[in-house]
Image: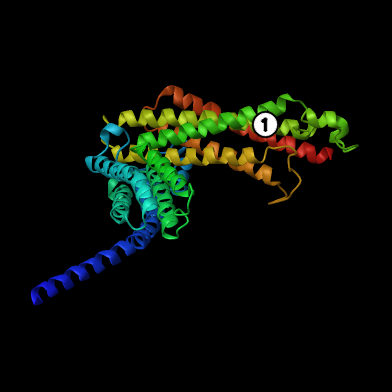
Amino acid sequence: QEVTGAGTRDLRLKAVHVIMATADAIPSALQALKKLSTTLEELDNKGIEHSEALTEQFQKLGLQHGDQHQTSLQKEAQSVQHLAISFYRHQDMPLDITKAYDVVRTGADLISATSTKFTLVERIKEHDGYKLVEDLRKGAELIATGCIVLHAPSMGVGRSARTYVKQASRGVVATLIALVSSFDDGSARISDSTLGAQKTGAVWDCCEKLKKIPQGNRNAMRRDLFQWVKDCNDTMQEFQDIIDLGPVPATVAEGNHDLDWDDFCEGADEQYSEKELKVAQSCLALIKCTRGTISNVLNACDHIGELLQSTEEKTRHLIWISSLHELARNVGEGATELGVMLYPPLDMDGEEEDGKSALQIQIETQVQALLDTNGFILSIGTNIDLASEVVAFSKKLYVASEVRCKEAVHAIANTKVSS
């Protein structure tokens, strides 16, 4: 009887421990997921921690002889925030990086397969999904592990590739936290509620996006460049349509009366005045220069990438590629900022700095980014046998950017004189 009684007590104690562990499974997993989210958020995808050392390295690898673009090149070497890359093409990607991407994908697959089961089981009976929530946590840990490896400086993964994997990984963990939280607070357990299904769908979507991120430096950089070109095309189409409408009726532009119904239906509230039209046309020409510059950067990076197999100065060529891409980032993001300011009516009166409006400052900033990028390509062209069409196109874009800037500033000045 004593043996039997002791055995019964042991079984009861084990049952109590299991019940307690089951009840604590979701809160414990939720706490772990939040820690992983913080860890992913703090990953350095922009290379802030290493930019100074890389700038110094680039200066040591800079031009050894004088030429007309050397000053521009040295200036960009000091101002561009570099993040070292150790490879460019996908086929040159080290095995450790390939394995890290595989780990991330394995984690996403595990979460996709488990999230639906977890939702269904927890809806039927509370705490029955305690083993499944552990699998969800393990999947998130796999994703975080692969992401951390890809952010290690020794891996040589650049800013673009780091950013894609970081953003997508954070999205998976964030939606996973939302799903688990909905069962922890009971909101997904309410009868006839579809909240659990909605949260699960969000997890699926983020997992699919994570599995489709561009892998490696070249693929990630090219996706950035293609996205910036697309943004330029969309901006150009939108504002070309407004320009094609012609100037707003003179009576409306002069403020003699409010828009009547016919003017409103014809889009007069979305048209430029006669004074604004020339400014808008010049800005649109700048965005065209932006699109051409980004396309030229893509060609230049690929050409430099092809030379990596036959050069002994791979480090210098890789730094040129990463630096050029960062300059293109300034150009692409600057075009978006410029586009935001082009909606009529144009604000050309506000004085932000040295008597200039915010629009004029953005125009000059964008032009400087164009000059820096094309000047950098010309600098590289004096050191290696860069494709002649790439160098020739940069020369044209360099000159065109200066001309368009003068046209835009002159048009803004004329509007102030006229007013």
Which residue, as the protein is rendered here, is positioned at the far bottom? 2
- Residue at the spot 47% in from the left edge and 54% down from the top edge: 190
**x and y percentages locating residue 24 in the rendered image:** 33, 64
Q: Nearer the viewer, residue 191 or 133?
A: 191
Query: Residue 161 placed where, x, y %?
Result: 37, 42
Image location (x, y in percent) of residue 397: 55, 29
Q: Is residue 183 visible?
A: yes
Q: Residues within 10 Å of mark 1 (few under 14, many from 20)?
A: many
Depth check: give the residue in front, 44 or 200: 200
Q: Amino acid at mark 1?
A: Ser
Q: Is residue 87 left or right of residue 187?
A: left
User: Which residue does the image show at 74% across and 31% down from the upper left?
Assistant: 277
- Residue 226, compared with residue 102, is above or below; it is above
Residue found at the far front of this picture:
1
Q: Is residue 28 above or below residue 388?
A: below
From the viewer's perspective, is residue 91 above or below residue 142? above
Residue 287 is left or right of residue 328, and the answer is: right
The mark total stands at 1
Figure quadrant of the N terminus: bottom left
Q: Which residue is mark 1?
A: 282
Q: Is residue 46 left or right of residue 351?
A: left
In the rendered image, which quarter is residue 7 located in?
A: bottom left
Q: Nearer the viewer, residue 375 or 197?
A: 197
Q: Quadrant of the C terminus?
A: top right
Kindly state the secondary structure of the residue where label 1 is placed: helix
- Residue 64 can be seen, yes or no: no
**Looking at the image, which residue is at 51% across and 42% down?**
330
Q: How is the image coloured?
A: rainbow
Q: Farthest right residue?
A: 256
**Horizontal and vertical percent for residue 170?**
41, 50
